[in-house]
Image: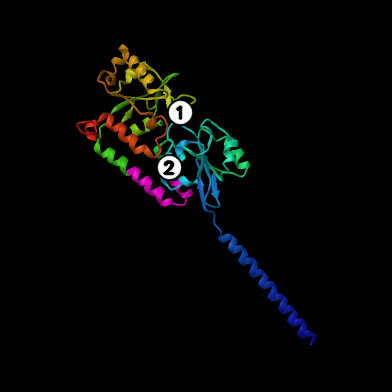
Amino acid sequence: MKRRIGFFLMLFFTVALLAAGCGSNHAVSRFDAQKSFVTVTDDLGRTVELNEKPARIVVTSASFLEPLEAVGGAELVVGRPDSQTKMPDYAKDLPSVGKVYQIDTEKIMACQPNLVIINKGMNEKLVDTLEANGIKTLVLDMKSYEDVKREVEILAQITGDPDKGQQLAAAMDEKIAAVKNKIPADKRRTAIIHSTSQGLTVQLDGSIAGSIAKMLGWENVASGMEPLAKNPDAAPYSLETLVEKNPEVLFITSMGKMESIKSGMDKTLQSPAWQSVAAVRNGNVYYLPQELFLLSPGIHYPEAVAHMAACLYPEVFYDADGK
């Protein structure tokens, strides 16, 4: 009798242990089955994991506002910087977190975000402080066209609609391809001058205008020049070098009031040296709009490409009335 009782006790404990073990394994499998909402790699090379769709997003650059709207994220934005350009209607009444180069951390926190999207090259210093306060950060670069396409797809993943990002990137590709198909495939020797109140620089291929000229298959006569120490997308201005390179087209980008910049440059181009340059002599000098060429045009890159192409081939893009 005692042996039977001992046997049944051993059997009971064995079954109990097995059941406990199965229960434990079941809990682990449920935990393992839980997945984060999205995991992306930002432009600092960091792996950023979001456990759920962010409900409150603050951006430190207005360049992110239109792309977010385009992929269905407008209602998620609760804070943005001051900006005189690139401010879509939906964001105009949102709380400001300061000027782009003077973002106020306290104002960000007052918005109670669970994600802050930071523009690379401007506000990376905010990352450590925000992360230390439990706020996720994502650092993105929106300068080049390839940057924009990549970031659009990342933003679409964050808003939970990756298809919209892929569709938008594909649509931009199609528009740019259509522009390129309209113009001759000849290389045009171009130079791009950036004019500010501090002086002139020559834009390299990495600049917005330089990258678009390259996209159109044109030659930037400044390619290969030694860049400035603090600006890898620009080289020192040298009239002697430009005269030697003799570009047939001159594009001018600017920072400041366009009227003042244009007035000053028009006078500068009257010098005998400048008049010896083919672009100036033949009247092929074009001032590019700041909203497309000063800062990244973002999802308006196709418009920037079309604008630059239309400068050289207006008959392809405009009717007899210039429309």
Q: Residue at x 44, y 25 (%)?
A: 227
Q: Residue at x 44, y 52 (%)?
A: 161
Q: Residue at x 30, y 35 (%)?
A: 306
Asked whether the residues under the numbered discs 1 and 2 touch, taking CB atoms below 8 Å apart as contact, a structural biologist would say no
Q: Which residues are magenta?
A: 147-173
Q: Is residue 95 left or right of residue 3?
A: left
Q: Quadrant of residue 280?
A: top left
Residue tagged 2: 67
Q: Is residue 42 left or right of residue 195?
A: right
Task: Give the image location of residue 293, x and y in percent.
Answer: 38, 30
Residue tagged 1: 232
Return the residue nearer the eye: 88 or 48: 88
Q: Amino acid at mark 2?
A: Pro
Task: Tell me the crowding category of disc 1: few under 14, some 14 to 19, or many 20 or more residues within 10 angstroms, Cα based.
Answer: some
Among the two numbered marks 1 and 2 on one chain, the one whose residue lies closer to the N terminus: 2
Q: Residue at x 63, y 42 (%)?
A: 133
Task: Give the image location of residue 286, x and y in percent.
Answer: 31, 25
Q: Furthest-left residue in view?
A: 320
Assign the C terminus to one quadrant of the image: top left
Return the residue nearer the eye: 148 or 240: 148
Q: Furthest-bottom residue in view?
A: 1
Secondary structure under the numbered disc 1 in the rendered image: loop
In the rendered image of this protein, does residue 58 appear above or below residue 253?
A: below
Magenta stretch secondary structure, dominant:
helix
Q: Amino acid at mark 1?
A: Pro
Task: Give the image location of residue 20, x and y in percent.
Answer: 67, 70
